[in-house]
Image (tube, rainbow, N blue to C red):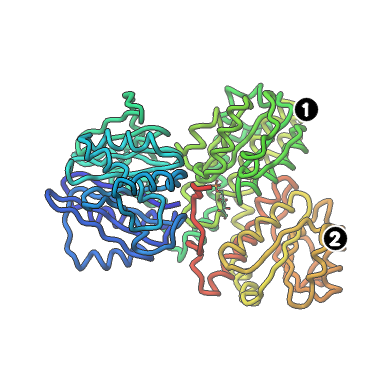
Amino acid sequence: MCGIVGYIGNKNCVPILINGLKRLEYRGYDSAGIGIILNNHSEVIKNKGKVSLLEEKIEKMNLQAALGIGHTRWATHGVPNEINAHPHYNKSKNLFVIHNGIIENYQILKTGLEKFGYEFVSQTDSEVLPHLIDSFLVKGHSLFKSVQLALAEVEGTYGIAVIYQGEPDKIVVARKGSPLVVGIGEQENFVASDVSAILAHTKQIVYLEDGEVVEVCKDRFTAKTIMDKEIEKEIHEITMSLDEINKGGYPHFMLKEIMEQSSSVCNSMRGRLLLNEGTSKLGGLENVIDQLVNSKRIIISACGTSWHAGLVGEYMFEQFARIPTEVEYASEFRYRNPIVNKDDTIFFISQSGETADTLAALREAKIRGALVLGICNVVGSSIARESLSGVYTHAGPEIGVASTKAFTSQLVVLALITLLIARKKDMSLVDGKSIAEEMQKIPDKISAILKLNDQIEKIASEFKDVKNFLYLGRGYNFPVALEGALKLKEISYIHAEGYPAAEMKHGPIALIDENMPVVFIAPKDSTYEKIISNIQEIKARKGRIIAIASESDDNIDKLVDYSIKIPDTIRMLMPILTVIPLQLLAYHIAVKKGLNVDQPRNLAKSVTVE
Ligand code: F6R
């Protein structure tokens, strides 16, 4: 959601902070700010809007400092404006705090602090932090101790970075529910909410766990819990490169990520598909495989696009692994006292691995004793670390807010898991081999679909001004209809709904007229004939139809206005292919409307608040 970056060393921190903030902008971007300290001088500069506006403001000031923190904000409490932007500070303006997350008891804390004369200028929950820390500093505690004491009073979630003119040799950071890392350099150290902010400077990373407070100086760091217990932290070497998070010549991250999908799904499968044995090898599941195979029930929990992947997973698990499967929004699961048994397996799917609802649902499931497994893209993310075991999707960094390549990689991983369980149960070698062989052909088929980009762009021109869209699919392609509709609405702001095609006649058909475009996902599979009947029902009511159809289908052209022909595969893998034209359609419509596809309004890449 919001982004944090900080620097301590011998260099001028200002350009380091600004560049870090630019890399973090995809997480949240309604305002930004930096706080810096140099000897006896401290300065805070904030601005509404993009980091580039903050940069313009700072350029005129010629600032130099070797210690500083920066923040990009995505508003939760208080409108996006300069006052509500971070850093927040104490009355003397010599203590700066940046905060990701939500302080749930901020009203109580604020009222208490006001009684002692503390004055608040912003509408944010975050502003209680500098005042609360200040209230301990004035009693003579060190900055580190003051942060520990303040956090002991805080309820809610946070990733924070704090600097103080009285102790200008350190940044104090802490985490509960909002990611934070320390980057280790030579006579310089960094802090960030996301490694992408500091990757240009270091690959040596220390991940903070919930409840940890770390004092970061330029040549050392020390970690303790809030309750002052010392902790040994491990330094991890990360492999992600800067190139991987650049646009690579594409106008938008979203297009780059769509176009990467033949290689990203390949990476998800690499070394995991055992063609001769007709199964898969997933290192992360080896120690739990018996428990997984013998599960009485599988629950898949996730949010948004990852939840759609879960729905496809349900079809796969029930058809081949023959384990009853339920899919549930993490936000619902966590609050409804779900029935979870010890012989259940619960998969939590998350691209970022930081989604607050998914993480909370995971913790709830762990308490209830189920086998808790993660399917995550971001290595070392909270969900990955807190799951008992799991599988990384290895789709590479996804920067565009709309999830694309992460989704197809999630589907690949779900197919690999299906194959693994099914072969340990009753799937024959012959059937396992034929699925594995089909999986291996998927990257080439994706490349063929991506070549339809120009055709899809032309179709997008025809539809860019419509107000509503309907997406219909059946079976494995029903979740794809939901995903196609989500992609369109989140980046083009066109209202779109996904439905199982047969449900149309139970209500949505009333919406159909010549102004209502309908996207049918209609590959030649066992429900093809039924989908054709649905197409005819729409045509009879003058609806305009775009069909995602099989290459071999010559019949469909006379029934629809536009057809996008894609290669066939087996039903369980079809969503990996059918979703790609829908991603491109949404992308081109949004671009033609002049919208910011990588940073759509009101959205953030990683939703670390409830
Ligand atoms: C849609 C989108 C969101 C995410 C959702 C879950 O394009 O990106 O719906 O899928 O916020 O995020 P993760 O997968 O990071 O848990």
Q: Residues within 10 Å of mark 2 (few under 14, many from 20)?
A: few
Is residue 523 shown left or right of residue 416? right
Sort mark 1 into few (<14), some (14-19) or many (20+) by Cα contacts within 10 Å. few
Q: Nearer the viewer, residue 309 or 223?
A: 223
Secondary element type, mark 1: loop
Image coordinates of residue 574 in percent, x first then y, are 71, 50
- The type of residue carrying mark 2 is His
The residues bearing labels 1 and 2 have C-alpha atoms spaced at a distance of: 38 Å
Viewer-side residue, 299 vs 375: 299
**Residue 60 lies in quadrant:** bottom left
Question: Residue at the location (35% across, 44% down)?
Answer: 160
Residue at 38% of width from left, 41% of height from top? 180
Image quadrant in which you'd find residue 109: top left
> Which one is earlier in the sequence, the residue at label 1 or at label 2?
1
State yes or no: discs 1 and 2 in contact (Cβ < 8 Å).
Answer: no
What's the amino acid at mark 1?
Asp
- Given this view, does label 1 or label 2 mark the residue nearer the observer? 2
Mark identifier at residue 29: none
Q: Nearer the viewer, residue 214 or 202?
A: 214
Helix, strand or loop under label 2:
helix
Query: Would you identify the image quadrant in which residue 503 lies?
Result: bottom right
Does residue 277 show up? Answer: no
Q: On the picture, is 535 further left or further right than 77?
A: right
Q: Indicate the position of residue 257 as horizontal and vertical percent values.
A: 51, 56
546 left or right of 99 in image: right
Residue 255 seen by the camera: yes
Q: Position of residue 589 (x, y in %)?
A: 59, 70
Residue that mark 1 sits on: 426
Q: Would you say 183 lies left or right of 102 here?
A: left
Residue at the spot of label 2: 506
